Image (cartoon, rainbow, N blue to C red):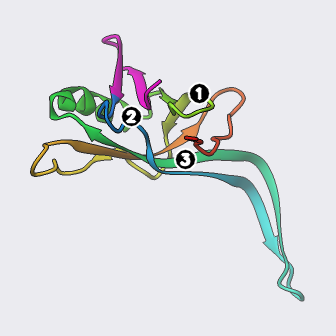
Amino acid sequence: MAASIAFDDGSGTQTITGSSVVSRFNRWNPNSVPIGEEAIEWGSGRGHKWPGRVDYLVSFELPHIDHTEESKVQDFLEHANRFGLFTVTTGDSESNVFTDCQVAPGTRAEISDPDPETLEITLRLTAISVGSVPTRFRRIHTG
């Protein structure tokens, strides 16, 4: 199974993958951020946080996207940057699939300039899990 991003912008489901030679995510970096009230004790400086929720995020790159896929990638950018939902399939040894993802607030999905020799592009983004039960993104295992 290849690393991919699937989305439906109203014109049907489309899937973006990298090259068949190197089809994996790069710079995969999961994180969790507690959202809620916090306070710092006056005397000790010790911090406290009372989270109302935890946001699960992951930043990553999908490299080696063929230039013939650029129209599909542009459709994805328009969809994702308007907080459209998408699914991330890692293609790793655990076959992780993360549904109900959006671009994280305060960030944008973007693409690199084309590689001068291969014309391949790289998609970069930070995603947040927004399902009714948010999912923690897991480390990718390729072994």
Give the crowd class for mark 3: few <14, some 14-19, many >=20 residues within 10 Å.
many
Residue 106 left/right relative to 46: left
Which residues make up the magenta segment?
1-16
- The answer to whether 93 is drawn above or below residue 55 in the figure is above
| Foreground of the two, 1 or 109 | 1
Mark 1 lies on a secondary structure that is loop
| Residues at marks 3 and 1 touching, judged by CB atoms closer than 8 Å | no
Is 14 a magenta residue? Answer: yes
Q: Is residue 13 left or right of residue 1?
A: left
Q: Which amino acid does label 2 sit on?
A: Ala
Q: Mark 2 points at which residue?
A: 80
- What residue did someone put label 1 on? 95
Name the residue at the right extreme.
43
Judging by the rendered image, the residue that carries numbered circle 3 is 58
Q: Which of marks 2 and 3 is nearer the N terminus?
A: 3
Q: Earlier in the sequence, mark 2 or mark 1?
A: 2
Name the foreground residue: 114 vs 7: 114
* Residue drawn where x is 66% and y is 46% of the image: 55
Task: Between label 2 and label 1, give the one nearer the viewer.
Answer: 1
Q: Earlier in the sequence, mark 3 or mark 1?
A: 3
Distance of label 2 from label 1 (alpha carbons):
23 Å
Q: Residue at x 34, y 29 (%)?
A: 17
Q: Residues within 10 Å of mark 1 (few under 14, many from 20)?
A: some
Determine the residue positioned at 44% across, 34% down: 83
**Disc 2 versus disc 3: nearer the observer:** 3
